[in-house]
Image (cartoon, rainbow, N blue to C red):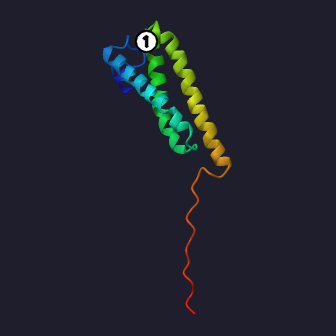
Amino acid sequence: MAYLFITGGPKGGVPDNVALALIGYGLFSLLVIVRDLRWLLVQPFNTSYWAFSFGIGALAFDIVLARARGMGGFFDWLSVASMVVANLVIGALIIGSLWQLFTGRLLANPPAATQEPAPS
């Protein structure tokens, strides 16, 4: 995201090869996450899953920004698909976090206070 803004702001020209390489690296990282999805889905939901939200959201934003700057063809359908996936993932994180909040599992219980018996 930062590189796309440094090289022309939101209304700059068509992204250069470095920007496209960074988007490609983001897509590769997404494929690694998809590969590990079967391991992730058997784990109980935890708020640490929010760590995936930045990368997925940033990738979707970069793809949409590249499309808005004039990249066509592949980016036409990829921008729509990336926004759908990002919204589904972040929506699932919101629902999972709200579920944990309402079932009382979002915040950790404080440890029980240990008292030593009073001397006799």
The x, y position of residue 15, in whole percent, is 36, 14
User: Around disc 1, counting alpha carbons within 10 Å, would you say few (fewer than 14), some (14 to 19), or many (20 or more)?
Assistant: some
The x, y position of residue 38, in whole percent, is 53, 34
Q: Quadrant of the C terminus?
A: bottom right
Residue 75 versus residue 95 in the image, above or below: above
The x, y position of residue 83, in whole percent, is 54, 21
- Residue at image location 55% in from the left, 90% down from the top: 119
- Residue at image location 63% in from the left, 46% down from the top: 100
Q: Can you name the residue that lies furthest to the top here?
A: 73
Residue 97 versus residue 80 in the image, above or below: below
The residue beneath circle 1 is 69
- Residue at image location 62% in from the left, 51% down from the top: 105
What kind of element bears circle 1? loop
The x, y position of residue 91, in whole percent, is 60, 32
Q: Can you name the residue that lies furthest to the bottom here?
A: 120
Amino acid marked by disc 1: Arg
**25 to the left or right of 103:** left
Q: Can you name the residue that lies furthest to the left here?
A: 18
**Image quadrant of residue 43?**
top right
Number of on-image labels: 1
